[in-house]
Image (spheres, rainbow, N blue to C red):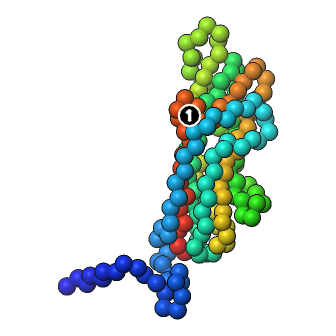
Amino acid sequence: MASILKTDKIEGVTASGTVQMPAGVVIQTVDFTYGTTVTTNSTGYVDTGVSAVITPKFSNSKIYVTGFLHCRINGNHDHGVSFKMRRHIGGSPTDIYTAVSTYEHYFWDGSTSGAHDHHTRFPMFVVDTPSTTAECTYSYQYASMRTDYANVTYMQTNSSPSHGFIMEIAQ
């Protein structure tokens, strides 16, 4: 015979928030969406405007961060874009992941100028161990791989926002 446990709240015997959850259980989830267009043709990293905040409940938790960054590359020659994910604890940024996406071919935009556009939603997945219960802000930066030929890289264009989620996972 199966047992049924019904409850409205689980609380530790001596203090709230001390219940040990089994490893792999999702403790909390935060989702984010950002739709304001950001533009650069710089090879130096600039903020995409995409960020989210989570405050881990346990210092030994792993934080699973997933972002789908909408990017549009425009230019007359092939180039790519580089992305960087950062974690901020108390205002101090730490780069936790860098990825480079190089596009070798573009889809012709139909204009007679010869300019080409490529739209993509670039995924980034990171498992982080911040070892804290302090507020953690995860943010993204990007850089164009080339600045010649009037290449421009846009984030969050044509009503296509960047979005993602953060999960705290018990250990």
At x 70% / y 26%, what residue is drawn?
A: 152
Where is residue 37 shown, x and y percent of the image?
A: 63, 34
Question: Residue 103: in sight, yes or no?
Answer: no
Outermost residue toward the left?
A: 1
Classify mark 1: helix, strand or loop.
strand
**Where on the picture, by quarter, is residue 3?**
bottom left
Where is residue 94 shown, x and y percent of the image?
A: 75, 58
At x 78% / y 60%, what residue is drawn?
A: 92
Query: Of 160 and 36, which appears nearest the observer?
Result: 36
At x 54% / y 46%, what residue is drawn?
A: 33
Location of residue 118 with respect to 19 vertically, above or below: above
Where is residue 9 shown, x and y percent of the image?
A: 41, 79
Query: Of 114 and 69, which appears nearest the observer?
Result: 69
Location of residue 9 with respect to 78 vertically, above or below: below
At x 36% / y 78%, what residue is drawn?
A: 8
Where is residue 147 shown, x and y percent of the image?
A: 78, 27
Circle 1 Cα neighbour tier, 10 Å, few/some/many (<14 / 14–19 / ≥20): few
Query: Of 135 and 75, which appears nearest the observer?
Result: 135
Location of residue 7 with respect to 41 vertically, above or below: below
Count of marks overlaid on the render:
1
| Kind of residue at badge 1 | Thr
* Residue beneath disc 1: 120
Screen quadrant of the N terminus: bottom left
